[in-house]
Image (tube, rainbow, N blue to C red):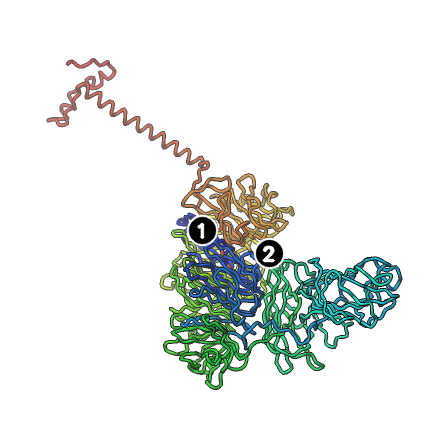
Amino acid sequence: MILIPPTQGVSYTPVPPPDLDLSSLGRVALTGDFDSISLYTYQQQSENAFTTNGTQSLITQLPNGDFATTAAADGYIKALCPFVMSSGKLAGVIVGGNFTELGGIPAQGVAMYDATTGDITPLDGLNGTVNAILCDQDTNTVYIGGQFSGADSTNAIAWVGMSGWANLPFEGFNGPVNSIIKESNGNVIFGGSFTGLGNSTTVMPEQLDQQVINIASANITSSSNSSTPGFNNPVNIICKTNGEDGSGNTWLLEDNSKGWWRADMNFGYEPSLLRIWNTHQDGRGTQTFSFTAIPIDGIMNFTYTDPDTGVEGHCDALCPLSSQTSVPYQDFRFINTVGMSAFRIDITAWYGQGGGLDGIELFQNDIFAYAVDAFNEPSCANIQFGSNSTATGPWTVTPSLQSNSEYLTANLIGPGVSTNAVSVNFEPDIKQKGNYSVTMFTPGCIQDNTCDTRGIVNVTGIYATASAPSTPTIIYQTNNYDKYDVIYQGPVDANSDSFRPTVRLAPLAGQEDGVTLVAQRVQFNLTDSTGGLNGLYEFNPNANTTQTNFSSSAIDSAGMGLSARAIITAIQVQNNVTYVAGNFSNQEVGFENIFTIGNGNSTALPNGGLNAEVSSMIPYADLLFIGGNFTNTMNGSVPGLNNVAIFNTTSQTWEALGAGVSGAVESVVTLEVNVTTDQPEVCITVNGFFDQILATGSSKAISVAGFAIWVPTQQNWLQNLNLQSPAILGQLSAMTNVTGSATLLAGTLSLQDVSAEDAVSLTSNPLAIDAIKVGIQPQQVGPVTRKRAVSGQNTTGVVAGLFYNNSGLNLTVLGGAFTATSTNGTTIDNLAFLNNTGSNSGIVSGLPVGLDSDSTFLALATTGSVLYAGGTVSGTVNNAPVNGLIVYDMGLARYSYPQPPAFGGIDIAVNAITVRPNEPEIYVGGNFATAGSLGCPAVCVFRNGAWNQPGNELGGSVSAFAWQGNNQLLAGGNLTINNNATTLATYDTSKTEWTALDAASDVPGPVTALGPANSDSSAFWVAGKSSNGTAFLMKYDGSQFRSTGDSLGKETTILGLSVLTLGKNHESSDLVPFNMVLLVTGQLNLPIFGNVSAALFNGTTFSPFIMSTSGNSPGSLSNLFSEKAISFPNAGGHMAVGFVVLIALACALGAIFLLVVAGILIERYRRKHEGYTPAPTSYFDKTSNMGRIPPEHLFGRLGASREPPML
């Protein structure tokens, strides 16, 4: 099913299975292009792929083990925790991550999910990312950690009961928190990348009002302008800080008139200081003014110093300006911090004849660098190292809409776009050296309608002269609403002639064509803290004060013993021993990246820990499953620990998971999996940036997409087990058990019930699908180049198949475009035989050498043990070229000799092969012009070892055949009859003539699929694509075509049509008899429901039947094939005349027989009633007595009347 659409709560509705009766067909199979497949069993199923753009969802498991999305997020989810209050009541599940929306509800990084109703409650008040959550029932408290600000705290805060956010006594940390866990003594351990306690954003710089707000790029307007040339332009006072009056330097109002001056910017800001230069031109000047913030339209309050008295004053609507020429400018400090994107200065009183100004500047305490360079500090401000940015690549300016400011957008077209050629470099104006928190702002995607194409960026930075570039930060830009990510916390050097801090945003390598990226702004916040910590902090919730003597805590002391700026990523407590993992070392004790704290001491794990960073760690029984970027223990003594490992806490030993995986592991999460049918067990999912499960022992390397499942009971990867198990793809980041509800997962998953490559068997009692195992190898990701000539669809997988059970052989034959591995280990290309004959059961083989490896088989048929296989086939067989068709003797397991002469023409393809009933004639249809030297377009007949042209009227390309009796062949495709276009034509074998079907003009496009609707195909189904690209499906009832209407979505492609028998009737319709159903296969889109690979049509409604996937895309089903031909039982229509005559004759004979019997019985009764007795049966002398009876005595009274006997 692949992930299921969002549902409310966790109520799921099972779907009754269709009552198919396949018993008359023998073995039944389905072919297609898929690697996993499922029957439709729950209404919540769908065929959507898992997401790869960083968005995740809350996921629950259905009763059959499949998955359902309960709430989708626009970012990733990192932590889940059921909040059970001290009363025992479940308040909800706390969900944390880097999202701005969850379940369609705006929520910044954290929300509460009701597992019963599915409702989402945003926990408003935080800005940033939540990494870790601890729900403490004892104290009725939820501890939240991450990279955020909220209330008066940074990176750590508490949610108490249902009353809301509460600052922790220590007000958070100066760096991110990655893990929170509770000890047995009730204390809470925080782990992360911090060096001290305290709110890290409350420190003001030594120099206030550092950054100049760019008014030069604003749209400047004014009212009541002076009519005097040179003084009427409001732009005159921009970037004028010398206070000089004069034309071009001064802006004046009309005499004795009030007026205003306004600046509208394309970015938002929070000014801290207003600086104004008054004019003295001709004795004029502004006496009082007010400052209105826009868009709130509020008059701002200021403090200022009176230049005459030196006394500080306050003003709002009537702020005074001095008329003294000795006062160059006046500063007005904003009392309130207010965001705005425009402002207006209203001049209400003036000196002399009128008001005016010589200059204006705005300042802010915030330090920003904008991607749109026009918003950075103006060059005219003469700042030595003003903020700036440089954009390289196809960036364009996008309106701010609902965002804070305009921003840059880049559409990366073409898979070859170099990530080095697309970037934005931000250079902030840093005047003070210190510890900073650096934040990257990302505008939401809803406002600019780019949510479907938003991509991923890689952000790096150089912050200090002696430091290397920072660890890259991967930011997923799929957020629906504006968000920010903390990309760095640490020391930053001030600007100088030799160094400038720089932040670089660039696309992450390897993204798909058509990705949209955005770049808006970067902020630097000066931070401070108490110091003295190093990634670990132990908090006592019962203490009244914050402990600053960190050496008294074994946890804090353990952190201080680690290498500087240690990063703690995971903490677990097992048997009162605390396991700490991350990126660090301790040379004194001798360990790296993982250690334990017990009995007040830091202790190295065996073999010194692991040789590189640990990113995730979870408990399972007495084991710890650990993921990261390591390859071995510190001393290199345990091979096979490639990026994932097990530590046994009982035996204190390391264990390998096979040979590990090929790349870094980001998270390790438990998951229940039906390893064997209906036997769920807890498994370990490994999620990250790898593409292989590494080979070990007899197990070959397995290609995966960053997701692998370890089965503890089997001590092996699920992908290695030769079991009928589900196929699961995607990523998981977190899980939690919810009392009274299903397990809740976070991530993005796709699951199908059966892992199978391109072919499955189908049974009806019970309804089930099973893999047909012929060793088909998973498809490699890349462009598809093989094309199906008729439909134009990409052809990969198995297209055609047949069962052959005769002449002592039991074979399943599969043809298409695939690579498989035979039983003896050789490679098979495109045609495979599964031999289940006698003791050879399960042997897989292919064709002998000779065909080109890129051949594709599209059609199969047999006469006796001889196989005719056609398609886009080329190569050399028996030293002769073949094209379009090969003939293979399955009994002798070799090519037949000689092969039929090769087809000729352009884009040669054989699409259909059929054998004439009761005749050794093979009809081959497709796209070709000649067969050998014989002109034979579209259809050719192979008879008696030679090609024959059936009639000379047909042209074009044939896609499908059906026999209408023994002597008439129906062909569908893109055809011509005597150069007149048609989609359907019939061939009369007795007349050797092709005729266009009269009603074919009603078919809106070429026919690509055709299926009988009754026993002689006088009624049939057709499908294809109309000229506008939409799919059509129609039935011919013998006189006219009838359409199913617009019941299929535009993206539908129909590949196969089969009418099947039902065990239970449905309501009758004109299109489908009540005891049958139409199976439609392909890549279908059912409106309202979504994508399916097969659907059942009962004449009125399409019902989902089968879902499949191929890689991370919807799969498709090509055709159904069966051991026996599909039969058409009587469906309540007219009976054949012959049957009517026979039944009438039988009824008449039966009536005569009954009349004769009745007459005999009546005669016997009469005789007995008249007194007749039986004649003697033995005589003394028969012959003599017979001779004495005169004939008249025997016959003389036959005609006389009888008299009643005497009584």
From the viewer's perspective, is residue 647 above or below residue 133?
Answer: below
Picture quadrant of residue 152: bottom right
Identify the disc placed on residue 655: none
Q: Is residue 882 visible?
A: no
Q: Which residue is mark 1?
A: 13
> Looking at the picture, how far across and down is residue 355, in whole percent?
83, 62
* Observer-nearest of 506 and 1075: 506
Horizontally, residue 934 falls left or right of residue 541, namely right
* Observer-nearest of 638 and 517: 517
Q: Is residue 107 visible?
A: yes
Q: Of circles 1 and 2, which is in front? A: 1
> Looking at the picture, how far across and down is residue 1206, in whole percent?
16, 13
- Quarter occupied by the C terminus: top left
* Observer-nearest of 746 and 364: 364
From the viewer's perspective, is residue 548 above or below residue 52?
Answer: below
Q: Which residue is mark 2?
A: 792
Picture quadrant of residue 659: bottom left
Q: Identify which amino acid the numbered label 1 is placed on.
A: Thr
Query: What whole-number distance in Å separates the C-alpha atoms at marks 1 and 2?
Result: 38 Å
